[in-house]
Amino acid sequence: MIKGRTFMAIVVVFAFWYLLAYVFKTQILPYPHLVFSALLPSLGKGLGGHFLVSTYRILLSLLWALILAVPFGLYLGRRRRIDELVSPMIYLIYPIPKIVFLPLILLLFGLGDLSKIFIIFIIVFFQILVTTRDAAKGIDEEQILSVLSLGARPKQIFLHAIFPACLPKILTSLRISIGTSIAVLFFVESFATENGLGFFILDAWSTLDYLSMYTGIMGMGVLGVIFYEGVDRIERKYCRWMFNP
Amino acid sequence: MIEVHNLAASYSEKGSKKIVFENLSFEVSSGIPLSVIGPSGCGKTTLLYLLSGLKKPEKGEILFRRERLNGHQREIALVLQHYGLLPWKTVFQNASLGLRIRGFSKKEMKETVLPILQELTIDHLLDRFPNQLSGGEKQRVAIARALALRPSLLLLDEPFSSLDAFTREHLQNLILNICRQRELALVHVTHSIEEAVFLGEKALVMNEGRFDLLSINGVGMAARNSEYRKSDNFHQYCNLLRGHLKR
């Protein structure tokens, strides 16, 4: 069920859209109700399938980035000397737009899903890595001492102190990564594929089918909402302490 | 119960070792609480970390029940200056953390922790998180967590420094009662002369590498109450400590 604030946000976005469509009066920016009326025909053209393919690509990229970047970031954050060695390498690679490696990635992973998933993964990996590392660095040492003073072993220190302390920031980095990954998704689905929302949007654009194009854009919006809502739910469940001021 | 022989502690700064203190010797037995007092940076907290096994001494040795202390020891409980509560754990989870780490079952944890929380009158806060508690309540949870391990030596690091005067005095009384009832040995670090005299029967004054071990045994633990705070005896010991700190 849509909550009050979400409903208000939808109203504001659509009101703004209506206003722009009214001002510009162009086929390239149709009224929202016309886009909604094109939703059923778009589903007939396979919009649902494209949506699922994009969801799969984003989900897999984010999962792999989390699985690899979170433990590595936590390790670097708690090992100052290794961090001092590794950080310069991270700072060297992080700002380079990973898209420039596209020819190499296509050569290594082929034209299929793997290369697309890898590009999204490698971009969000660094965002999650740097945020997680900084979160682990910033843990209040008294919290570690407190668990240590109870006789905790390294695994228990990680479980009771380090991971829970970093979780809110990991989830923040995940939120940032969702936005980035959907932006990159559009790019990676613009070549060597015939499925995914990016392909659907570009295909509709090339045939001047603007109504279908906007249904694809709305699909990307819905994709973002689903992922963001998922992260919010995880946060409400596992970071309950933050919501009890 | 605990003996300290020729203890020295140091820390590293820019690659070189700086001595915090050296040649420190004293002993603590149950029923004779020790107050450690001195200016900031004299090594009071470092001493407490050494006694708890969290740090290793540079030189010397610490004997607990005549055995050399080497790392964490279950019978020694430490309450940190800012309580050391984990914000993501509820009062019950925080208080039972030591037991959970030792693999106690949920039933055993409840049986051990709930009576302690009742004794400390915080059993109605079981499901609250630390950010929902007052300073005094947080301090009680930290004490409950320490007591849950059934320690024989309780170490307190400036336990009441951030509390208001009323709560501070109330908790000081509570600590003395707990130590008396459970026959706990107590070492507590403080900045406050009054607190050192009220809680301690001996005082270790640490000042610029010099140590003075003083007897401040005004009255027995049972007689330390609001009246004792007003007595001439209490003020005399406060002045004695003040004199040693100014030397």
Image: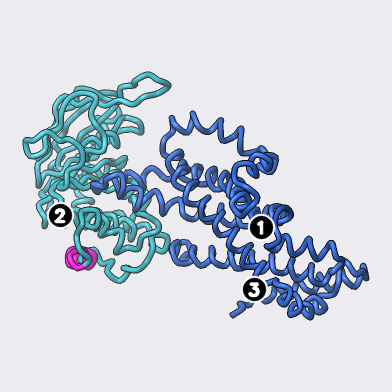
Chain colours: A blue, B cyan
Graded by Cα atoms within 10 Å as few (under 14), some (14 to 19) or many (20 or more), the crowding at tag 2 reads some
Residue in front for this viewpoint, A195 or B1: A195
Where is residue B20 shown, x and y percent of the image? 30, 25
Q: CA distance from mark 1 to mark 3?
A: 23 Å
Q: B71 above or below A5?
A: above
Residue highlighted by disc 1: A182
State the SS at label 1: helix
Where on the picture, by quarter, is residue B192? top left
The residue under the point 30% across, 31% down is B43
Residue highlighted by disc 3: A5
Q: Kindly give the residue lying farthest to the top in the view shown.
A: B16
In this image, B128 relative to B108: left or right?
right
Tag shown at residue B150: 2
State the SS at label 3: helix
Where on the picture, by quarter, is residue A81? top left
Comparing marks 1 and 3, which lies closer to the viewer?
A: 1
Q: CA distance from mark 2 to mark 3?
A: 50 Å
- Number of marks in the rendered image: 3
Where is residue A52 shown, x and y percent of the image? 61, 67
Q: CA distance from mark 2 to mark 1?
A: 54 Å
The residue under the point 65% across, 53% down is A180
Q: What chain does badge 1 belong to? A: A
